[in-house]
Structure formats: C-alpha cells, structure tokens
Image (tube, rainbow, N blue to C red):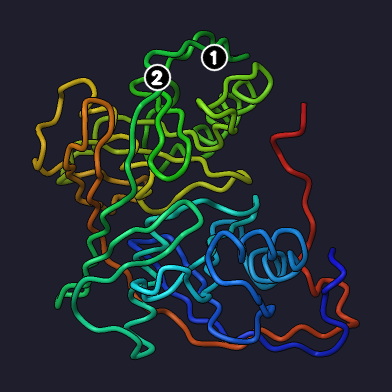
Amino acid sequence: MSKNEPDAVRRLRIIDSHTVGEPTRVVISGGPEVLEKGAVAARDFLRDEADWMRCCLINEPRGFDAVVGAFLCDPVDEDCVSAVVFFNNGGYLPSCIHATIGVIRTLEHMGRIGIGRHRLETSAGVVTAQLSADGSVTVENMPSYRTGKNVVLDVPGYGEVSGDIAWGGNWFFLIAGQGPPVEQSGIADLIAFSMAVRRVLDSSGVRSEDGALIDHVEVFGEPREGLDADSQNFVLCPGGAYDRSPCGTGTSAKLACLAADGDLAEGKIFRQAGIVGTVFEGRYRRIDAERITPIVTGKAWITAESEIIIEPDDPFRFGIATENIFKKN
C-alpha cells in the first residue's frame, strides 16, 4: 500500500454530503500529515506515499464506488480559503465541481466560511465559488475548451460512435444521440456502452492534446418528459462508477462544445439534467475564440459527521481491492 500506512488504530474525522445525489466525503482531521503547501504537492504526496487513505475511505466496506473524497490542506495562494485534493475509486482527480459544491457547504457547516465568494485551490487550478443564502453554490470553473469535434471510434458491439473531446476540469469524450437511451431504467446498458467506448479510447491511443487519458465518457439525450432541462446526460467516471449528479466538469465540457458550435449564447442559462433527474444550471463567459469560463450552479446537503476507524489487524482496513475494469478484455 505505502510505507506510511498506519500501524496502529487510526481515526479519520469526516463530513459527508451529497450534491444533487452525488456523494462527497471530506476529511477534516486524522489524515496524513502533508508538510508542503498546495493542492499539487498534497496530491503527489497522497498518491505516492499515503494512498491508504483514499483506499480506506472510498473502497468497500467503508465507502462505495460513487463516493468522491476531498482532502483539505493549506493553499499556496493565501487568498484561497483552502486547498483541496479530490479522489475516487480510480485515483486522483484534477477537479470535481460537484465535490467543490460539497466542500463549500462543508466549510460553511464547520463555521469556516459564510455567505459570499470564496476561492478554492485544486490541483488543476483555482476555482471561485459563490455561496448563496438559499444554500446553492455557483462555481466559476477554470478555462474550458474543445480540442476534437466528431472524433469517430469503431466500438465493438456498437459500430461507429462519434464524439467531441473537451476539457472541463477533467477530460471528456462527449457523445450525443448514440448508444442506449439516456434514462434511469437503462443504467446497466449505459455503463456497458460507455465502458466499451472508454476501452477503445484507451486502446486506440486517442488522448488529450497533452497526451492525458480521456477518462470520462458523457452520453447525452433528450430530457425525460416533465423534466425542466435542456439535456439529460449519463457520465461514466474513472474507475467505472457513474455520476449521480449531472457532473459539473462534464457540464463545463458540454458548455465549451455548445459555445464552440455557436449553439449557446454567452450568459444564457443551460439546464443540464443528470441520469437521476437532478439539474445543474450552467452558463459561460467567453475568454477568447477557443476558451470559456463555465459557471455552474448546484446545491449540496450535509448528510453525516462521523469517524472512520482503521484497526491494524482488519484485513480490509484499506478496503476491498477490485481490478480496474478498463484493463479487462
């Protein structure tokens, strides 16, 4: 696991929340000691020296595959209320908007912040979040943009599938109007389709402009009847879990594509529903011909304050290990 794994009983204090259905687990005390300031340094230390914390908090029996963890630490930028490292069952995430919303609500719950505008340092850059009196949080994301349009993949069992490649804080392959219907009753089919697409992305060498894995697959369809939204999506996250929220970084990537195609005017509200029917409101501010600043609004609710206990003789103290599904044939 790591040379810094606990050799005695360890207790991690956490606060859980969900952002319109997607859980966030914030570590508030008891985690590894990170000596260097900043989200990037903390991410590198946790990944390389103390990955036991992620495994313990996210994997069964203490967690489950949809949980996104957040580790609070000291920022390099002193104008930020905190730095944060995001992680899930697949590893460490550059950014996560639903978890940013959960972290802001958690910081409010702890009495560290109040209504107003707050800066949060992530390993992908600084985001700004406005906490409103009604509990909603509006996140001004980092610059987002599209790098590939109508990229065609030959997906076994499905034939040709085309999609766009875009950055919204994570890398996405965005697919519209193809594959199984985007509806909650078809989640198993959507998982199978998205996993097949992800495997082809990996095996065919389709990468981001900087060579990074495109590790999120986002499928769009018409919103179900009666749902006040412009679109409904299904998002497969790294590690094989699906997003219960509409996915904030995925919504940002979608806004970048809409802006690039001229299909959404600057400042106009776009309502993105997720697979369970909850909605994020998105809009954007244009930076230049290629990049936008996405602005995403959602709401989180605190669900628990608890203490995770790690006993050194527990055979599953670091969770039940599972094989990465994307490495299977």
Tell me: residue 161, above or below residue 194.
above
Name the image quarter holding the N terminus: bottom right
- Circle number at residue 158: 1
Name the image quarter holding the C terminus: top right
Residue placed most toward the observer, 50 or 299:
50
Is there a contact, CB below 8 Å, between mark 1 and mark 2?
A: yes
Which percent across, then down, holds residue 100? 38, 63
> Callout 2: helix, strand or loop?
loop
Q: How far apart are marks 1 and 2 (CA)?
A: 9 Å
Name the residue at 65% across, 25% down. Answer: 202
Name the residue at 30% across, 29% down. Answer: 221
The amino acid on which the numbered mark 2 sits, given as a three-letter code, is Gln
- Whether residue 90 sits left or right of residue 163 in the image: it is right
Tell me: residue 273, above or below residue 133.
above
The local crowd at label 2, few if under 14, some if 14 to 19, many if 20 or more residues have their Cα within 10 Å, is some
The local crowd at label 1, few if under 14, some if 14 to 19, many if 20 or more residues have their Cα within 10 Å, is some
- Whether residue 118 sits left or right of residue 34 in the image: it is left
Splitting the image into 4 quarters, where does residue 125 fall?
bottom left
Residue placed most toward the observer, 325 or 286:
286
Which percent across, then down, holds residue 49? 77, 65
Tell me: residue 137, above or below residue 158.
below
Residue placed most toward the observer, 221 or 110:
110
Which percent across, then down, holds residue 103? 40, 71
Name the residue at 45% across, 37% down. Answer: 186
Residue placed most toward the observer, 266 or 25:
266
Splitting the image into 4 quarters, where does residue 82 fall?
bottom left
Which percent across, then down, holds residue 256? 28, 33
Name the residue at 17% across, 44% down. Answer: 283
> Callout 1: helix, strand or loop?
loop
- Whether residue 295 sits left or right of residue 101 in the image: it is left
Which residue, given by chain and number where applicable, does mark 2 sit on? Answer: 178
The amino acid on which the numbered mark 1 sits, given as a three-letter code, is Tyr
